């Protein structure tokens, strides 16, 4: 096509600028069209992502109480974050240990296990898929309210049942020891989305690979180890990365559980002061960030916390993705 | 054609002029519309306020005031930032006066108070204190909350207790005597629940009974130095341990929510309770047959002179910056905070304490023996409040956090912990950009 244009241009010299101009106009029209079609995304990205990100970075170096203009304080917010704030390391510990190191493996294993079982179901697989997926449709607030009710230490059906068999049930969301396991239980209940992705991956494993492995004398565990796991490993990577990012941003369930279990969500005009109830056990990093930003009105400091969260999330994701080359099976050789 | 166009243009111009004149006419003769945001959301409280605002609308023809209930500080701050704040705002959170005054989010009322000749002496000292910060007075009190002891007379009689406790050791002894447990040790009726975080139990309300000091003249925390704090904490923990921390947690997990008719004191599951004066109205509306009494909070055994005093805070009201109708807004604020008829009526309806000295003795206040206790505590010169600091509610929240850790057994060295808390509070205030005012 280009050659044809060049030949024609050589035959008639005065036509060249005209054609070039026409082509440029067409190119510009195409670009304009592309820009026009992309504009909703560009506007959305700029307004809801780029601008808040840049502002957050700027505000993290300011004292900003939401009402008076930001005042430049240099690194003071970061100094307070790393050296003074008495709650920040407790919140980091709760988030990293419980919501990343414990909850993510539990969620991946549970979702994968359920997917394997559902994939093997000979009959009623549709019912099982629906039953295990359904909790994922429940809004997080409603699901948490339901769990706080079911696990109420005094009147909840779980502890009432336990008391009938002579067991003094735990305090669940009201106990510093049990509140985080209760939240993990809630997160396991809602693994429907991950389970469905795992199920699709498991069903997608080529049957001939299992047959070859069987011919080679591989048992069920070896087939799982050498056939299923390598084949679904990209999905495991996806679930781990997503789980870690969600774990670092864990907020809604902790906020709702603390406010309901502490009994402080009853008067609309009151500002809730029981975040982290009981005894900071549900004080996760995003919950603390919210408290500083929207309860204490220290948005400059909260922005510094948000920037740290962004950097850590990015770094952790990068480490996982880079390390994944060692254990994620690549279908196409690089 | 031209003639028609010219005629059409003249007609349109005439219509525009008539419409503009009509609009101006309506604007100049109709009442100015004002909106007031309030925190009240509980049925009888919000409707009572609305009823009195209707009365204001009837007697002040130049304005029409609309009430919006269930507002918290987050909404107030968001509205001020976005320039959509109402003409008048009120908050339950006097702790946040530091934020509102310091930032200019609520305008300084000093010049208007001066112009209308409303001196500080109009209001009791504590309420005047918690409505100002750093030389500015950006809020005024709209009824106060005063805290005292509620006790169940029927349960007292059954336990052989003749009068409410006056000291902390009497309170602990009565609490133990009144507590009923089932065979497994679970609490059926709590004599008293000393847990911090339960209902109105917060350190700032308790430390009043020990005469504890918060800050020095420079605004630095005295929590690590004043022995009153460790003395109170030791008393509180010993009573928590007598009940058993987990027993209390299990007891609190029952459906006994504070602002519902199933509240534990109202239903007889709690024999004594530390609560605000508003409970009188709640009991009247929800459990009118409850046989109960009210008294000042018991005090430190070593400080009997403090008996009769109590902790005070309350609802604050102000004008957000950028309001369009400043004069009308100020007139409304002035009426709601200094009109003794309004204060007495509203006090009768929701049983909060009226906040001018004159309204305290108003003949319009309906006599009520339960409520009278709180009026007496309010008038006591030793009654006080907590400091208004630059970090706002975060300051008292940090103190509460510490004592919640303490009662759960997570703080091993109380005095060391209090010293650390004090330095953290000072750092928090510095971080928030300012000092505090001495109560």
Image (cartoon, helix red, strand yellow):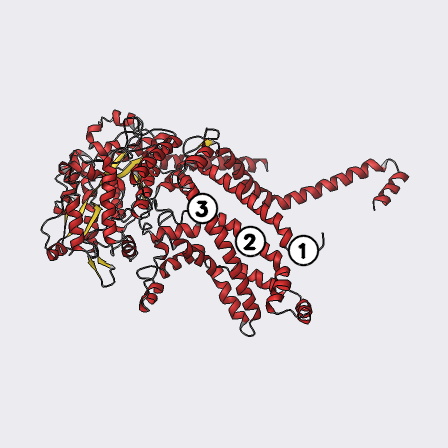
Q: Are marks 2 and 3 on the same chain?
A: yes
Q: Chain of mark 2?
A: A
User: How far separated are the C-alphas under marks 2 and 1?
Assistant: 17 Å
- Reading the chain from its start, which is encountered first: label 2 or label 3? 3
User: How far separated are the C-alphas under marks 2 and 3?
Assistant: 19 Å
Question: What SS does tag 1 mark?
Answer: loop
Identify the mark at residue A330; answer none if there is no mark.
1
User: How far separated are the C-alphas under marks 3 and 1?
Assistant: 34 Å
Identify the mark at residue A192; answer none if there is no mark.
none
Residue B33 vs residue B214, the one in the foreground: B214
Q: Which residue is mark 3?
A: A93
Identify the mark at residue A240; answer none if there is no mark.
2
Give the residue displayed 35% in from the left and 48% down from the top. A279
Q: Is residue A182 visible?
A: yes
Could you tell me which quadrant the N terminus of chain B lies in? top right
Horizontal side, residue B314 vs residue A133: left or right: left
């Amino acid at each position: 096509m280009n050659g044809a244009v060049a030949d024609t241009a050589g035959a008639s010299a005065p036509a060249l600028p005209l054609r070039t101009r026409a082509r440029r106009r067409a190119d510009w029209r195409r670009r304009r069209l592309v820009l026009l079609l992309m504009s909703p995304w560009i506007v959305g990205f700029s307004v809801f992502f780029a601008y808040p990100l840049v502002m957050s970075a700027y505000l993290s170096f300011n004292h900003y109480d939401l009402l008076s203009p930001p005042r430049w304080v240099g690194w003071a917010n970061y100094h307070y974050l790393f050296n003074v704030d008495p709650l920040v390391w407790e919140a980091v510990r709760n988030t990293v240990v419980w919501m990343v190191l414990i909850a993510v493996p539990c969620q991946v294993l549970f979702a994968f296990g359920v997917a394997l079982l559902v994939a093997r179901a000979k009959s009623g697989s549709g019912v099982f898929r629906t039953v295990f997926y359904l909790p994922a449709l429940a809004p997080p607030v409603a699901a948490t309210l339901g769990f706080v009710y079911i696990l109420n230490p005094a009147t909840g059906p779980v502890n009432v049942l336990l008391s009938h068999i002579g067991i003094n049930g735990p305090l669940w969301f009201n106990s510093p020891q049990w509140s985080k396991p209760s939240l993990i239980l809630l997160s396991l209940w809602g693994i429907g989305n991950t389970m469905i992705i795992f199920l699709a991956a498991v069903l997608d494993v080529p049957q001939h690979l299992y047959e070859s492995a069987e011919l080679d004398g591989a048992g069920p565990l070896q087939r799982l180890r050498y056939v299923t796991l390598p084949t679904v490993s990209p999905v495991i990577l996806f679930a781990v990365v997503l789980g870690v990012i969600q774990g670092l941003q864990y907020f809604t369930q902790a906020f709702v559980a603390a406010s309901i279990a502490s009994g402080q969500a009853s008067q609309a005009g009151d500002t809730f002061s029981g975040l982290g109830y009981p005894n900071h056990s549900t004080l996760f990093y995003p919950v603390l960030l919210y408290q500083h930003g929207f309860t204490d009105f220290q948005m400059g400091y909260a922005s510094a916390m948000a920037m740290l969260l962004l950097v850590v999330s990015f770094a952790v994701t990068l480490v996982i993705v880079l390390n994944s080359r060692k254990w994620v099976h690549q279908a196409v050789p690089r | 054609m031209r003639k028609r166009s010219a005629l059409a243009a003249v007609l349109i111009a005439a219509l525009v002029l008539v419409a503009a004149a009509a609009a101006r006419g309506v604007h100049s003769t109709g009442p100015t519309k004002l909106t007031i945001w309030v925190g009240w959301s509980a049925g009888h409280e919000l409707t009572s306020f609305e009823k009195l605002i209707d009365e204001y609308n009837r007697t002040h023809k130049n304005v029409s005031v609309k009430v919006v209930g269930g507002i918290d500080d987050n909404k107030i701050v968001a509205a001020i930032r976005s320039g959509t704040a109402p003409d008048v705002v009120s908050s339950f959170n006097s702790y946040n006066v530091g934020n509102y005054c310091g930032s200019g989010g609520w305008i300084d009322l000093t010049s208007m108070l001066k112009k209308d000749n409303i001196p500080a002496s109009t209001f009791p000292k504590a309420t005047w204190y918690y409505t100002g910060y750093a030389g500015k007075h950006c809020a005024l009190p709209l009824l106060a909350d005063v805290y005292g002891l509620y006790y169940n007379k029927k349960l007292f009689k059954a336990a052989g207790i003749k009068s409410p406790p006056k000291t902390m050791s009497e309170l602990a002894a009565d609490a133990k005597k009144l507590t009923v447990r089932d065979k497994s040790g679970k609490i059926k009726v709590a004599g008293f629940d000393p847990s911090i975080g339960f209902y109105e139990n917060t350190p700032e309300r308790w430390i009043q009974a020990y005469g504890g000091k918060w800050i020095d003249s420079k605004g630095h925390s005295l929590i690590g130095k004043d022995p009153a704090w460790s003395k109170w904490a030791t008393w509180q923990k010993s009573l928590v341990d007598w009940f058993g921390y987990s027993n209390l947690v299990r007891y609190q997990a029952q459906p006994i929510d504070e602002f519902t008719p199933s509240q534990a004191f109202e239903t007889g599951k709690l024999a004594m309770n530390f609560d605000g004066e508003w409970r009188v109205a709640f009991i009247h509306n929800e459990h009118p047959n409850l046989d109960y009494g009210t008294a000042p909070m018991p005090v430190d055994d070593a400080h009997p002179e403090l008996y009769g005093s109590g902790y005070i805070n309350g609802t604050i009201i102000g004008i957000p910056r950028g309001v369009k109708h400043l004069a009308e807004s100020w007139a409304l604020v002035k009426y709601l905070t200094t009109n003794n008829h309004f204060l007495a009526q509203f006090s009768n309806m929701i049983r909060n304490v009226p906040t001018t000295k004159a309204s305290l003795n108003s003949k319009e206040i309906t006599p009520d023996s339960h409520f009278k206790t709180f009026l007496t505590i309010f008038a006591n010169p030793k009654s006080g409040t907590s400091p208004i600091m630059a970090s706002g509610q975060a300051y008292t929240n940090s103190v509460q956090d510490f004592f919640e850790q303490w009662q759960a057994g997570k703080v091993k060295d109380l005095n060391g912990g209090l010293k650390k808390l004090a330095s953290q509070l000072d750092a928090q205030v510095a971080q928030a950009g300012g000092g505090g005012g001495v109560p």
